[in-house]
Amino acid sequence: MTRIGVLALQGDFARHAQAFAEIGHAPVEVRHARQLAGLDGLVVPGGESTALLRLMDHEPWFPELRRFHSAGGALFGTCAGAILLAREVRDPAQPSLGLIDAVIRRNGFGRQIDSFETRLELAGSERPLPAVFIRAPRFVELGPRVEVLARLDGEPVLLRQDRVLAGTFHPELTHDRRLQRMFLDMVTESLQNGENKSTETTASAHPGPVAQERRVSC
Ligand code: GLN
């Protein structure tokens, strides 16, 4: 059984924990960097990335999260969590972990559509994926090893690089659990492959999935 944690410093961690519990993988709530020891995967929830960074000041989170990743741990960042994982953050610039080779722009969807619900085409799946975007960031540059798993109007909104998954929406707020299962599969795969997994590339060209519908919900 894989051991999953959810970073529980700030943001929507309780709903993430509930979403994984629904599919039989109740995660540990991680409030201290030392709790990363013994985990195979970590979910970094959405919320407010600046608040998250302030809360992380109290412990050596950045070196411990990088160590967790390089030791084979898988990460799933959503919204503010994706901001934290990115290589570079813009508007404004702020520190990030650089665990996925992407540049992200905070609040990149602008004011008039700052929160909305839509359905995405998910690579490898025939059914559209419901997705809730809340003051969502936007991926503006991707490195060559980054695989795009879902797009909105042609723009990437769900990325994977090796054992890091990053999405700009909130998969915990819908009833669809395919992304939670996808992450658990990644964790299992990473465990089976051992640490050498990080030296392989998963870059590939999926045909661009497109958003099928968009409506402003709040
Ligand atoms: N706009 C937030 C930020 O910049 C992210 C919003 C979210 O996580 N829903 O951190």
Image (cartoon, rainbow, N blue to C red):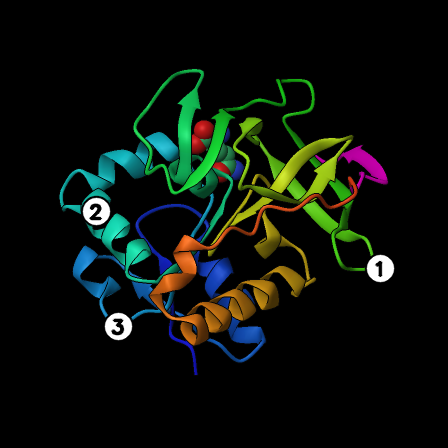
Under circle 1, the secondary element is loop
**Among the two numbered marks 2 and 1 on one chain, the one whose residue lies closer to the N terminus:** 2
**Residue at 38% over, 74% down:** 3
Residue designated by label 2: 61
- Percent coordinates x, y for residue 30 in the rendering: 29, 61
Magenta-colored span = 209-218
Is 155 placed above or below 175 here?
A: above
Kind of residue indicated by mark 1:
Glu
**Among the two numbered marks 1 and 3 on one chain, the one whose residue lies closer to the N terminus:** 3
* Membership of 4 in magenta stretch: no
Kind of residue indicated by mark 2:
Trp
Q: Quadrant of residue 108?
A: top right
> 10 Å neighbourhood of mark 3: few (<14), some, or many (≥20)?
few
> 10 Å neighbourhood of mark 1: few (<14), some, or many (≥20)?
few
Q: Are marks 3 and 2 in contact (CB under 8 Å)?
A: no
Kind of residue indicated by mark 3:
Gly
Q: Are marks 2 and 1 in contact (CB under 8 Å)?
A: no
* Dot label at residue 38: 3
